[in-house]
Image (cartoon, rainbow, N blue to C red):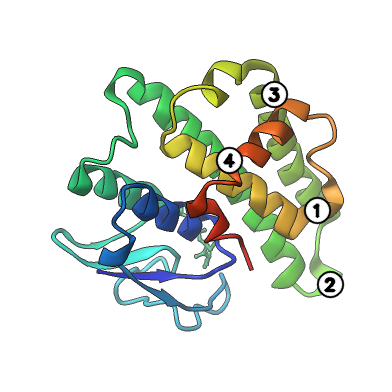
Amino acid sequence: MKLYSNPASPFARKVIVGFSEVNAIDDVEVINVIGNPVDSGDIPITENPLGKLPTLVDTPFGTLYDSRVITRFIDHHYDGGLYPSSTLFETLKMEALADGIMDAAVLMTYEKRVRSEDKQSEVWMDGQWIKINRSLDALESKGKEFLNSSFNIAHIALGSALDYLDFRHSDRAWRSGHPKLNEWSEVISHRPSMIATKPA
Ligand SMILES: N[C@@H](CCC(=O)N[C@@H](CS)C(=O)NCC(=O)O)C(=O)O
């Protein structure tokens, strides 16, 4: 299988960490490509008409996207235990929350990097940050049970999301005001799969 990816993409990282955590990283060749919403670059648009990463090709089910579909595939194909049946819907919800943090953070990045400076909207970027901050507040105050639960796909997604905030939006200082999340992210960042995929 071939995974179209980029070292800066938190969604692609989630998938690579997923493969690593089920000990299947050797089954996938990672191909780094570059593209953005206004120029798909070398993202394989015939395989994925949305022109997004990650895109996984040559699976037993053909080409798969997006990250949540690919992580479900990994879990199914390798019997990975990434989606524990006893907490399936809570896990899916927390994965969606972490993915939503990534979505908002990636949109902020595109606003800054893809739009010309005179067209950038601070109000719009602040609106994205409010979504992120509200999600972090919810995790900080109500997420204890989730943070301490046995390792699953939502932890991988959240770890990838938080590192992406450090990587692209360190000026927003998400760690201040979120001590429990801060501590949790330190712990997860020591997993070999996370060390090997730190955004660059
Ligand atoms: N919902 C998608 C989001 C993927 C996504 O937004 N990927 C970004 C890179 S981090 C991308 O491919 N952007 C190019 C574009 O939006 O055209 C997923 O979970 O895979």
Closer to the chain start, of discs 2 and 4, is 2
Outermost residue, bottom side: 42
Sequence-earlier tag: 3 or 1 = 3
Q: What residue is shown with label 1?
A: 170
Residue type, label 1 = Ser
Residue 11 left/right relative to 141:
left
Residue at horizontal 31%, vertical 18%?
86
Residue ID for mark 2: 117
Mark 4 falls on what kind of element? Answer: helix
Q: Does 6 appear above or below 70? A: below
Q: Say which residue label 4 marks.
A: 188
Q: CA distance from mark 2 to mark 4?
A: 36 Å
Of the image marks 4 and 3, the number of the one nearer the N terminus = 3
Q: Quadrant of residue 164?
A: bottom right
Mark 1 vs mark 2, CA separation in Å = 20 Å
Q: Mark 3, residues whose alpha carbon is within 10 Å: few (<14), some, or many (≥20)?
A: some
**Could you tell whether 167 is left or right of 190 in the image?**
right
Q: Nearer the viewer, mark 4 or mark 1?
A: 4
Residue 22, percent across and down?
31, 47
Q: Is residue 87 left or right of residue 157?
A: left
Q: Amino acid at mark 4?
A: Ile
Q: Is residue 147 above or below residue 53?
A: above
Q: Does the residue at mark 2 contact the one at mark 4 (Cβ under 8 Å)?
A: no
What is the quadrant of residue 75 in the picture? top left
Of the two numbered discs 4 and 3 in the rendering, the one whose residue sits closer to the viewer: 4
Circle 1 Cα neighbour tier, 10 Å, few/some/many (<14 / 14–19 / ≥20): few
Residue type, numbered disc 2: Glu
What secondary structure is found at the residue carrying circle 1? helix
**Residue at label 3?**
140
CA distance separating discs 4 and 1: 19 Å
Crowd around label 2: few <14 · some 14–19 · many ≥20 (10 Å): few
Disc 2 vs disc 4: which is toward the camera?
Answer: 4
